[in-house]
């Protein structure tokens, strides 16, 4: 049996995919392994570059099905490894991390997945700066049990098969959390190491440019889509406790409902202006940054709008095979 499958999910990653593949091939050296490039119908040279290497290359048939949850599941459909790692096309994998993660999975059968530190190579925007702070907090303890493996991880195939599918193809984001909560529901442990797992060369764009990218790519729908997934898999309570943006999105709707009601009973204009200014003032005091306060409040409101829209989006069964074409079969 193949020991490890590394799935590289890509979408227009011609600038990064070569190094991602080289790092994945180096990581499986010494193991019976495979590298699978799972492409979401790129329009650049990503697929052509990937076929230069001894990898499997599979491409999403219908570009309208692009979601963050599609790439991992598509790659998993074509994988055979006892352990499966999901790697973004703009990441470079650390072979030392893979060696230690495999040893942990071999020895501790209750562990369903192992993640590591994500080294962010760019800090051009507030979102990445916040992500770095969260990872730094998590690094304070090795072998830390966590809710999910954000940024990728090495998973046990047998554990994934027990929960039905690798990644929910309906999700524009939170696909790693959804996988994590399903694995934990079956008694699996997810552990985070202090070891660096990858170098991440993220979006080279500023804070506001990235925000608009989230809107036009559909990622702002993800909190509502996750809530729908939670209803289907019966983990709504955990979502409220563990995914901060879900109660925030619901809270934004409740906040404005109360503000409108008070305004109708008193004076609408002063009440609504006060309601608009209050969260910005509070966040400015809390973060000591007007720019960060505006970014946070705007993100909350976009997420609240997306929450409503995401709940209403039609879902297809997550385990349904994803239509694809094999551009290059297994080496």
Image: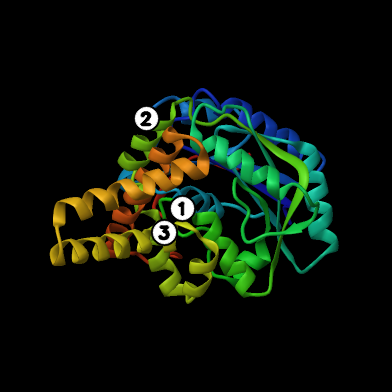
Give the vertical position of 132 relative to 315 (above or below).
Answer: above
- Residue 42, given in percent of the width and then of the height, sits at 40, 34
Q: Earlier in the sequence, mark 3 or mark 2?
A: 2
Front disc: 1 or 3: 3
Label placed on residue 69: 1
Label placed on residue 43: 2
Give the vertical position of 201 relative to 254 (above or below).
Answer: above
> What distance separates the C-alpha of mark 1 from that of mark 2?
19 Å
Q: Which residue is mark 3?
A: 248
The answer to which of 279 and 295 lies nearer the viewer is: 279
Kindly state the secondary structure of the residue where label 3 is placed: helix
Q: Quick check: 159 left or right of 243? A: right
- Residue 28, given in percent of the width and then of the height, sits at 75, 40
Q: Quick check: 294 left or right of 34? A: left
Where residue 23 sits, quadrant-wise, is top right
Q: Residue at x 15, y 51 (%)?
A: 269
- Residue 296, given in percent of the width and then of the height, sits at 42, 44
Is residue 65 at all visible to an observer of this figure?
A: no
**How many residues crowd mark 1 within 10 Å: few (<14), some (14–19), many (20+)?**
many
The answer to which of 331 and 67 lies nearer the viewer is: 67
Give the vertical position of 105 relative to 317 (above or below).
Answer: above
- Is disc 1 in contact with disc 3, using a CB cutoff of under 8 Å? no
Kindly state the secondary structure of the residue where label 2 is placed: loop
Which quadrant of the rendered structure holds the N terminus? bottom right
Kindly state the secondary structure of the residue where label 1 is placed: loop
- Is disc 1 in contact with disc 2, using a CB cutoff of under 8 Å? no
Is residue 218 at all visible to an observer of this figure?
A: yes
Q: Quick check: 271 left or right of 28? A: left
Which quadrant of the rendered structure holds the C terminus? top right
């Amino acid at each position: 049996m193949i020991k490890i499958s590394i799935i590289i999910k890509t979408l227009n990653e011609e600038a990064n995919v070569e190094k991602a593949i080289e790092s994945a091939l180096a990581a499986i050296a010494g193991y019976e392994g495979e590298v699978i490039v799972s492409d979401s119908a790129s329009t650049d040279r990503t697929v052509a570059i990937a076929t230069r290497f001894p990898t499997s290359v599979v491409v999403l048939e219908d570009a309208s099905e692009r979601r963050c949850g599609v790439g991992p599941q598509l790659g998993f459909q074509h994988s055979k490894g006892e352990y499966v790692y999901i790697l973004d096309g703009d990441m470079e994998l650390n072979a030392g991390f893979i060696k230690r993660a495999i040893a942990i999975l071999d020895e501790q059968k209750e562990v369903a997945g192992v993640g590591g530190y994500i080294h962010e190579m760019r800090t051009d925007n507030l979102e990445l700066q916040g992500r770095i702070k969260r990872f730094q907090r998590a690094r304070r303890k090795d072998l830390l049990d966590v809710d999910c493996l954000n940024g990728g991880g090495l998973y046990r195939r047998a554990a994934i098969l027990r929960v039905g599918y690798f990644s929910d193809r309906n999700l524009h984001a939170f696909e790693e959390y959804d996988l994590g909560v399903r694995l934990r529901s079956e008694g699996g442990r997810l552990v985070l190491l202090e070891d660096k797992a990858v170098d991440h060369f993220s979006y080279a764009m500023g804070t506001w440019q990235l925000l608009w990218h989230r809107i036009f790519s559909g990622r702002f729908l993800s909190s509502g889509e996750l809530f729908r997934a939670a209803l289907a898999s019966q983990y709504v309570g955990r979502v409220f406790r563990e995914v901060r943006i879900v109660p925030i999105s619901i809270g934004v709707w409740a906040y404005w409902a109360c503000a409108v009601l008070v305004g109708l009973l008193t004076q609408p204009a002063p009440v609504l202006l006060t309601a608009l200014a209050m969260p910005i003032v509070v966040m400015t005091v809390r973060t000591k940054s007007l720019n960060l306060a505006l970014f946070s409040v705007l993100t909350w409101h976009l997420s609240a709008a997306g929450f409503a829209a995401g709940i209403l989006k039609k879902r297809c069964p997550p385990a349904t095979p994803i239509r694809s074409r094999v551009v290059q079969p297994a080496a």
